[in-house]
Amino acid sequence: MSTTRVPVRLGERSYDVLIGAGLIAEAGRLIKERLPGANAAIVTDENVAALYLPALKSALEAAAIRIAEIVVPAGEGTKSFAQLQSVVEAVLEARLERGDAIVALGGGVVGDLAGFAAAVTRRGMHLVQVPTNMLAQVDSSVGGKTGINAPQGKNLVGAFHQPALVVADTATLDTLPQREFAAGYAEVVKYGLIDDAAFFAWLEANRDEVFGGGAARTHAIAESVKAKARVVAADEREAGERALLNLGHTFGHALEAAYGFDTARLVHGEAVAVGMVLAHDFSAAEELAPAADSDRVRAHLEAVGLPVSIEAIPGTRPNADTLMHHIAQDKKVSGGRLTFILTRGIGQAFIANDVPADKVRAFLERQAA
Amino acid sequence: MSTTRVPVRLGERSYDVLIGAGLIAEAGRLIKERLPGANAAIVTDENVAALYLPALKSALEAAAIRIAEIVVPAGEGTKSFAQLQSVVEAVLEARLERGDAIVALGGGVVGDLAGFAAAVTRRGMHLVQVPTNMLAQVDSSVGGKTGINAPQGKNLVGAFHQPALVVADTATLDTLPQREFAAGYAEVVKYGLIDDAAFFAWLEANRDEVFGGGAARTHAIAESVKAKARVVAADEREAGERALLNLGHTFGHALEAAYGFDTARLVHGEAVAVGMVLAHDFSAAEELAPAADSDRVRAHLEAVGLPVSIEAIPGTRPNADTLMHHIAQDKKVSGGRLTFILTRGIGQAFIANDVPADKVRAFLERQAA
């Protein structure tokens, strides 16, 4: 079994992201190496528990790590104050201490919730991420953003809390539904669009291999984690360039909110796919980027089965007012001006701090027409 | 008006504690100097709102700071997940952004709750502490510990989040009930007991003047803040010596929990007073410290009207089992061993990491007898 190690360099908060098939079976040893003596609470959701909890438990028990199990409902609704309280109190009830760990086994929802619980229980416990879907492996498990949703928007409550270790077992992707794999793949594409045109071109040439599994898939994951690790190391708390990782996310979050976070219609990665196309189209409409690059982005995302327009999302289409309301509530607003990640072309994204709201509104009205 | 400035040195998180009579009237200017352009949510409780909210509002409005007001119920029960959610959502509803501030106007409960809300709203907003009682001015507003209570114990959920400024208006102490002033005074005594026998002796000689207000009171507050600032600067996240600040707190927290956090019977500072006497008595019983020092501590705290034994607390006395249960749940447990702050005498406190639980139990059984 070959394991790829990607270090995230953050001084005393540095840690490794380990990527490889079958790594869950090694998790006990890997945790023990880094957190000797720590016991653990495994936080997972009902779906993931059925698939991987027995294997993870066995691995931790084999390393003599005492375990508490905390199973939460599956779905975005779990990123709530109520579930946060429930997880925190379960960890306390299990008498885990500051030096112990919360192990997040699952996708982005579990990772964000369990990570936030680790940040605030006893004012900070260790966190180990064991991401089991594509989106979590290439994005949400790395970089320390944790949190829950508020009625006013997604991820508006949370903490920066870096994991002590990320164990990305790529075998968990083998059984992932195609739709979910594609949603995670949208974030892989994002790294190419931000600052790596060559990686985007590689994805265009190798997408079938990446979706097929094996070495190409592992390469795509590792390149994504490296890209994210670079940005996070340069700007851990999003004072500046880390905001580039939000390419497609301002439009995307507004869409998720407008569709009531109904994952039957739109999951996060799909919203990001539509959002990235909108960011490229808006940039082209503002004559910042070539329209041909927009077309390439749209064609590539569409070819892997992702939605690339608002009308491709099932359900009642939100109007521009609704989307603008959600955009204004988004946390990437500063001093009343709109901040967007725009682009000068593939691999040339940039932070635009003063995008006029009326131009965005007019653009969205054209989308809805 | 003379203002005493005590700097808390924490690198890029450094800030000032300003101490003086009438400072609330200056709060707008003081905040504006440090956080230019920031708007603010004032979080306060019903009692404090009636006394000081109008003055603080006027001061902020005079400095052209836009204000949202968030009033929570008074009392320890407010340090709950439900109130945290309520404050966070009110801040979001007021459309405050990352660069804006939460201003905590009140005692320790408001400061801990509002501080935690500032730590997690949008993954971190600015925090300004405006403490209005003795305990908050000499202890809880300084050092960045924020949080709420859990069914399993006090302050088990929270974050380290340093304020950008602390404005301690000593005029707010003039109308404080004697019992509440004395409770805060217990924490002042604590600083002498930890590592400053000369300060303890000064308090013995000047306690009437400190309780009377004026220069002696300001001196006692400033010395307390300096002592806390030194410890926090050396160990911000309580990896080591910051634990000395918990002198009296392990016994004290257990007592508060055993009395159901019923402040009619026992407020935090009173619990700390009893806890400090117990810590000195236990140290004397273990032949670590002279019994004469215990007697001095007891005499001084009793002279200012603080309880100095479990039997002095009104209500059904908890038995040793109940207290041991709460002590074991306390967060200062590590690897199953009990950690206590013990002493070799006045001004000579130390961290004892391996206190045998059976000795503590036997000691508590003697107290209950």
Image (tube, coloured by chain):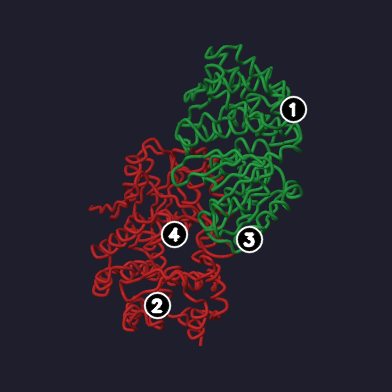
Chain colours: A red, B green
Q: Nearer the viewer, mark 2 or mark 4?
A: 2
* Residue assigned mark 4: A108
Disc 4 residue type (three-letter): Gly
Which numbered disc flags the more N-terminal residue, 3 or 1? Answer: 3
Which amino acid type corresponds to the residue marked 1 in the rendered image? Answer: Thr
Can the viewer see residue B123? yes
Which numbered marker is on residue A277?
2
Q: Residue furthest front?
A: B1
Q: Nearer the viewer, residue B245 or B200?
A: B200
Same chain, labels 3 and 1? yes
Asked whether disc 1 touches disc 4, contact meaning CB atoms under 8 Å apart, the reply is no
Residue B354 pos. (x, y %)? 47, 23
Which chain does the residue under circle 1 lie in?
B
Disc 2, SS: helix
Q: What's the CA distance linking mark 3 and mark 1?
A: 53 Å
Real-space CA distance between mark 3 and mark 4, rounded to the nearest whole angstrom: 41 Å
Residue A71, given in percent of the width and then of the height, sits at 50, 52
Q: Which residue is disc 1 drawn over?
A: B316
Report the chain holding disc 3.
Answer: B
Between B353 and A267, the one lying in front of the other is B353
Query: Do the residues under discs 2 and 4 have CB atoms within 8 angstroms?
Result: no
